[in-house]
Image (cartoon, grey):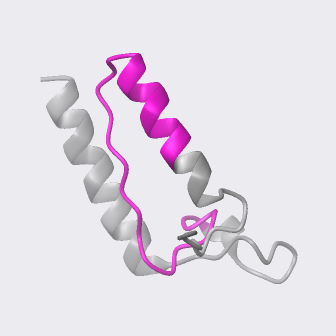
Amino acid sequence: MACKLADPLEPAESVIDFQKEMRLADASWQINIYGDAKHSLTGGGAVGDRTPEAGLHAQTEARSWQATVEFLREVFK
């Protein structure tokens, strides 16, 4: 069954390929997928009709920033 993400620039299959690549590299990694988040979910540049594949999503922006901080704190302790 194919999975359709809100991000039209990254097909779900590429997420699976990324996971495989990271496992092969024995890298420290994580993937967070946020519902209704388009490709550019943060920053003022993600607004307007110029790029419909992008869209500011304030709640996801806050959640993703928190997750980034926690991930970096763990990796660089």
Q: Tell me the residue at 65%/76% (across/down).
A: 55
- Residue 48: quarter of image: bottom right
Q: Is residue 27 magenta?
A: yes
- Is 53 drawn above or below residue 32 in the view shown? below
* As drawn, 55 above or below 64: below
- The relative height of residue 42 versus residue 24 in the rendered view (above or below) is below
In the rendering, at what x and y percent does residue 50 appear? 87, 75
Q: Residue at x 54, y 65 (%)?
A: 42
Residue, far top? 25
Give percent across and percent down for residue 31.
37, 49
Residue name at image x 59 percent, y 52 percent: 13
Position of the C terminus by quadrant: top left
Total tally of numbered discs in the picture:
0
> 37 left or right of 31?
right
35 in relation to 28, above or below: below
Q: Percent x, y for residue 68?
A: 32, 47
In this rendering, position of residue 13 left or right of residue 32: right
| Residue 22: quadrant of the picture | top left
Nearer to the camera, 61 or 31: 31
- Residue 32 lies within the magenta run: yes
Q: Foreground: 70 or 34?
A: 34
Is 50 left or right of 43, judged from the image as shown? right
Q: Quadrant of residue 51?
A: bottom right
Q: Main secondary structure of the magenta part?
A: loop
> Where are the magenta residues, as a range?
16-43
Write the residue at 51% across / 37% down. 18
In the current view of this chain or complex, which residue is farthest to the right?
Answer: 50
